[in-house]
Amino acid sequence: MSGRTDAGNTTTGGLRGGRIVGWGTALPDQVLSNADLEANLDTTDAWITERTGIKERRYGGTTAGLAAEAGRKAIESAGVDPASIDLLILCTTSPDRNLPASASTVQAALGLDCGAFDLNAACSGFVYGLAAANGYIAMGSKRILLIGAETLDKMTDPEDRGTAILFGNGGGAVVIDAVPEGDPVQLLGWDVGSDGDAEHILYAELGGYMQMDGREVFRKAVRVMVQSANTAMERAGVTAKDIALVVPHQANIRIIDSACDKLGFDREQTALVLQSTGNTSAASIPLALSEALDQGRVRDGDLVLLVGFGAGMTWASAVLRWSEAGPVEIGAAP
Ligand code: UT7
């Protein structure tokens, strides 16, 4: 594939890495059900449910507002002092304005004193952000707030049944601490990639609505999810049978089922929230991960596979060894 770049590696080999010590989510109040869509579009609840697995999605709010709410909950869940956060990364493809980065708005809302920037890799954004956060930690950062948040309602044509049924708003966040020397590293292997030659299958001009060739996205999505997940697992030195939980990008249940089937995972091993959130792009993986963690589905030592794909086309995967060790006292990290 021309235009394709690929990167990734293991985080072993002497570099210090991070571990997730807190998480939180945010969803706006306005629920848009399949019945609501049925009333205005040539579609049915039965078609949407069968073809996508989605029953409802959330509308409203702002990207910075949802990001700040999820971020605040993640900081509270970690039980850390907001003043100790030294970097904020907001993964989003739907910032509130061209300038400044929505991350700066979130920083002000949370009263943080740190660097802040937006990262746009569409629906793969959160996993790109996770790799970036671990890179910052390897270079000296001690505590990072990583958020995925989106308001896709403003980019979705309400009259286009091909996209209006899929997308919604939401936010999810994690606090990542630098792992003290001697503690196991959490990010065992990762992969990020892009094929810019496929940009025409899913795009939105500035201020415009998303344009999507759904069938083509579907076809490519399954392929890149399988390839990327396998690459990350190989780099981590593990196989599918070692993975306890898969957290896929929440786009379409048939994409998830097809990719998981090819990778050798059961539906029971998969974190799913798309039935009630729809596709929330960069927010979807932290939303699904947070729910699985809240439900106690991940235990100390479990391996978790995150796998995302999206416009670009981009893809990104990560294998984490879950650790229940709490936050790291600032100053204790190497
Ligand atoms: O983060 C990445 C974002 N994007 C995605 O993940 C999108 C990936 N693609 C998909 O999820 C699916 O392609 C869709 C859900 C968008 C569409 O499902 P599909 O099974 O690929 O349907 P299709 O486009 O092949 O259309 C099948 C039929 C067509 O009718 P005919 O030609 O067979 O008579 C469509 O016109 O279904 C029709 N159709 C609908 N019918 C009722 C398409 N959309 C709808 C609809 N309601 N909303």
Image (cartoon, rainbow, N blue to C red):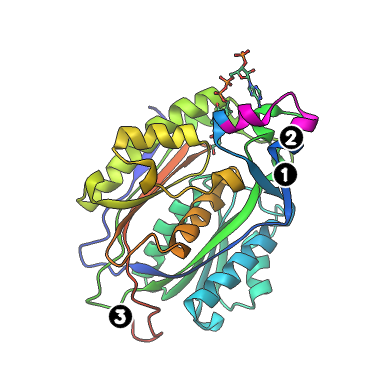
Marks 3 and 1: in contact by CB < 8 Å?
no
* Spot occupied by residue 14 in the image (x, y as percentages of width and height): 21, 67
Q: Which residue is mark 2?
A: 37
Q: Which residue is mark 1?
A: 32
Range covered by the magenta-colored residues: 38-49
Would you say the magenta stretch is mainly helix, strand or loop? helix
From the image, which quarter does the C terminus lie in?
bottom left
Query: Around disc 2, counting alpha carbons within 10 Å, would you say few (fewer than 14), some (14 to 19), or many (20 or more)?
Result: many
> What amino acid type is highlighted by mark number 2?
Leu
Q: Residue at x 47, y 32 (%)?
A: 254
Q: Residue at x 46, y 33 (%)?
A: 255
Which of 124 and 48 lies nearest the eye of the viewer?
48
**Tag 2's secondary structure?**
helix
Q: Quadrant of ligand 1?
A: top right
From the image, which quarter does the N terminus lie in?
top left
Query: Of callouts 3 and 2, which one flags the residue occurring earlier in the amino acid sequence?
Result: 2
Marks 2 and 1: in contact by CB < 8 Å?
yes
Q: Which mark is residue 312?
A: none
Q: Can residue 181 be seen at all in this image of the molecule?
A: yes
* Spot occupied by residue 80 in the image (x, y as percentages of width and height): 49, 81
Dot 2 beta carbon under 8 Å from ligand 1: yes
Q: Residue at x 39, y 37 (%)?
A: 225
* Spot occupied by residue 99 in the image (x, y as percentages of width and height): 70, 57
Q: Residue at x 55, y 77 (%)?
A: 76
